[in-house]
Amino acid sequence: MVMSITTTTITTIPLFHSLPKISQSQSPQLSPKMALNFLTKKPYSPPSWASHLNPLPTHTFSLANVPTPIHKWNLPNLPNNTEIWLKRDDLTGMQMSGNKVRKLEFLLADAVEQGADCIITIGGIQSNHCRATAVAARYLNLDCYLILRTSKVFVDQDPGLTGNLMVERLVGANIELISKTEYAKIGSVALTNHLKEKLISEGRKPYVIPVGGSNSLGTWGYIEAIREIEQQLQSENAGVNFDDIAVACGSGGTIAGLSLGSWLSSLKAKVHAFSVCDDPDYFHGFVQDLLDGLDANVDSRDIVNIQDAKGMGYAISTPEELKFVKDIAATTGVVLDPVYSGKAVYALLKDMNSNPKKWEGRKILFVHTGGLLGLYDKVEQMDSLVGNWRRMDVPESVPREDGIGKMF
């Protein structure tokens, strides 16, 4: 099914900027002195509703620009009385934009606590997580080693400077290429452990971060994000309560934190995850392991619904999906990435179109997890979709009139 997005009038909705003053011990993420705390390590105090989880993080690094805004997203052709709102985690930063930086706040604090002098992580050739990790590590004066999965056709070639690779290489990350075949045969854990042992033998002190930063410690990034959302909704004149939270799922840590936090907190919104790789059964099992690692005592299937949204495969986009991303941007101004949020919103609206009664009258918060740089990997596929240009026709009779500067 191909969905059409038609032009609609966009109503300006104010963002939630007015937040109650909260002491650092109550909420280090929303400290009034946040602007001066960037890149600082600080003690962590969990939300009261999560204080029974175990183990509790002891510290975080301030890496993300939070709180990120929430605003109404006036998408056309929604079921009756259905509203979709956006949590703009694509605005957590520029170099570290997206959901991964929230996890890194906890993971890198742990790395520094353990005396690490370098970071190892792993992902696809256009991994947003690897890019964010490379930048964050360099901010903290830690070397970074990235194991990047690519096609066997390109594994022996310079990977180039497209998208996330440009940023990773600018900040000096050490890139180790592995073919998809080798990755599947050996596995991400064995690959990172191999590199870890090699670096230890060279006298280094590496700290390994798993795919997507998705382990029980990284889960705290989105437990904390739920506290942020809760406080935004409790702020003066917010007047909004969400029935559902929707988000893309690529490694599992974000949905583990969102679903556990929503279940424990006052939000009580049902989390709907749209998996862009693997399958729902795999992710239910993986999320369950993360929850068990926190002694959460809850079944993942009771707190998160996971739907398949991978289409033709991870990071593989159909023409219909890319046209959808283009149409959403042209209609609402919101640019979705093609790998995660683009596929998730495509699947969400497709489900709404097929099952409108399921969504009628509901308020849904969609968490935009960033990934804008991934669009640069789709330039050739997108080229035919964005033809809005022509040579400007200026008659010779137009008189000269200079503006500010000559610009040549």
Image: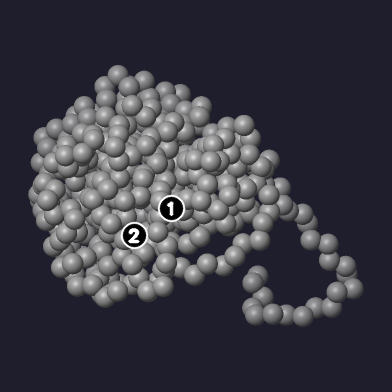
Q: Quadrant of residue 90?
A: bottom left
Q: Is mark 2 on a helix, strand or loop?
A: helix
Q: Which amino acid does label 1 sit on?
A: Leu
Residue, far right: 397
Q: Please determine whether, in this image, residue 281 is positioned above or below residue 265.
A: above
Residue wearing tag 2? 229
At horizontal 37% and vertical 74% (from top left) the residue drawn is: 236
Let me know if residue 146 appears in the view.
no
Horizontal and vertical percent for residue 206? Answer: 16, 42
Question: Residue 209's mark?
Answer: none
Q: Please determine whether, in this image, residue 402 is positioned above or below residue 281.
A: below
Name the side, left or right, on which 379 lies relative to 185.
right
Crowd rating for badge 1 (residues with CA inside 10 Å; few <14, some 14–19, many 20+): many
Front residue of this view, candidates 151 and 281: 281
Horizontal and vertical percent for residue 274? Answer: 42, 37
Q: Please determine whether, in this image, residue 17 is positioned above or below residue 176.
A: below
Q: Is mark 1 on a helix, strand or loop?
A: strand
Front residue of this view, candidates 296 and 314: 296
At horizontal 31% and vertical 48% (from top left) the residue drawn is: 258
Q: In which quarter of the image is the C terminus?
A: bottom right
Q: Please determine whether, in this image, residue 169 is positioned above or below residue 87.
A: above
At horizontal 47% and vertical 44% (from top left) the residue drawn is: 341
Horizontal and vertical percent for residue 49? Answer: 19, 55
Q: Are the two marked residues, 1 and 2, in contact with CB atoms closer than 8 angstroms?
A: yes
Q: In which quarter of the image is the N terminus?
A: top right
Horizontal and vertical percent for residue 190? Answer: 21, 27
Q: How far apart are marks 1 and 2 (CA)?
A: 10 Å
Q: Which amino acid does label 2 sit on?
A: Ile
Ranked by sequence position, the earlier of labels 1 and 2 is 2
Residue wearing tag 1? 365
Q: Quadrant of residue 10?
A: bottom right
